[in-house]
Image (tube, helix red, strand yellow):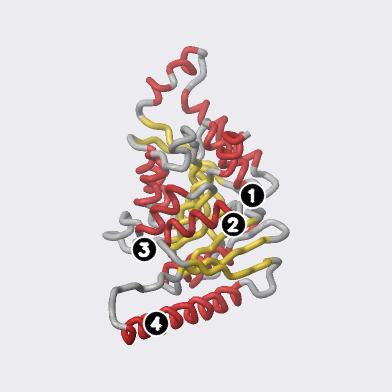
Amino acid sequence: MHNVLLAIDGSTPSIEAAKLLAHLPHPDSLDLTVLSVVQRPFIHSSYATGELLEKAFERDKAFANETFRQVAEMFDGANVTIKHAMREGPVGESIVELAGSLKRDLVVVGAKGHSQITRLLLGSVSDHVATHAPCSTLVVRPTGLHETARPIRVCLAYESSDSASLALEEIAEVPWKTGTDFHLLTVETYLSDFIGQRIADEGIEISSHYLEGLSDAKARLADVAPHAKTHLVKGDHIGESIVTFAEDNAIDLLIVGETPRSAVNRFLLGSTSRYVLRHAPCSVWVTRNRAVENMDS
């Protein structure tokens, strides 16, 4: 998380995204680009109407600059280099394009859904960015963290897979330290007896296999999250079990790994990531940097 792109539009979700980013620990220095996408209104009309639209466009740009100043104040005193970028055009596509051209490690956007009813309906922009960004993505939902003095509660959904191992590798770069209530979660499905038959044939109990994986993950995070807690839960559906754990433990940030599948659709979300992103009551960080690097190497 050295090079970050934060998309803002002055709305409450985008300000929440900025607040969470400012709250997160980061490595020694952070190169932060704050992006405002301003869309120029266009209609076939008289010159007088066109002049009014141009004035409205200038007001939108002025509002974007003022919002950037508010966001920049959140990072006062931090080791952060911050700059403002302004683009015209479709919002989601503009964010993804700039993330790629600037080679960002992380894109941060606000989600639209906040209530129990609407939270599974991602905004079109956040859904597009999470699906298509060529790097890791953090979609932010408010959890009341900023109104309290408690530590941030973070949960990494972990399994013995390449995507989870790569996610762990990426997250281990963040100095979570003692100010974070960190959890490692593995879901053992009821189909594990069939899926893990090869492991069982080798005389290894499925639950023991998962517990060993959790223990290894905790050891790999010892330097950055020394008090991480491990959890093994059983359920029918991995994504649903992750979301339920987040609800029951008032998690602020869920982290899930993503594995590209081909050069054609390598940035598309898998079923578990998409389920968690749409149903989680909290912010969701989809990690894919290491996977993309491995594919390109």
- SS class, disc 4: helix
Which numbered disc flags the more N-terminal residue, 3 or 2? 3
Q: Give the side of residue 11 with respect to residue 285, left or right.
A: left
Question: Looking at the image, which residue is at 49% across and 81% down?
Answer: 62
Which numbered disc flags the more N-terminal residue, 4 or 3? 4
Amino acid at dot 1: Ala
The mark lying in front, picked from 3 and 2, is 3
Amino acid at dot 2: Thr
Q: Name the residue under label 2.
A: 180
Which numbered disc flags the more N-terminal residue, 1 or 4? 4
Question: Looking at the image, which residue is at 51% across and 14% down?
Answer: 203
Distance in Å between CA atoms under marks 4 and 3: 24 Å
Q: Which disc is residue 112 wearing?
A: 3
Q: In x, y percent, where is residue 234?
A: 39, 35
Q: Give the side of residue 217 with respect to residue 262, left or right.
A: right
Mark 2 near mark 1, Cβ–Cβ under 8 Å?
yes
Distance in Å between CA atoms under marks 1 and 4: 48 Å
Amino acid at dot 3: Lys
Distance in Å between CA atoms under marks 2 and 4: 44 Å
The mark lying in front, picked from 2 and 4, is 4
The mark lying in front, picked from 4 and 3, is 4
The mark lying in front, picked from 1 and 4, is 4
Mark 1 near mark 4, Cβ–Cβ under 8 Å?
no
Residue ranking furthest to the right: 28
Label 4 environment density (alpha carbons within 10 Å; few <14, some 14–19, many ≥20):
some
Q: Name the residue under label 1.
A: 225
- SS class, disc 1: loop
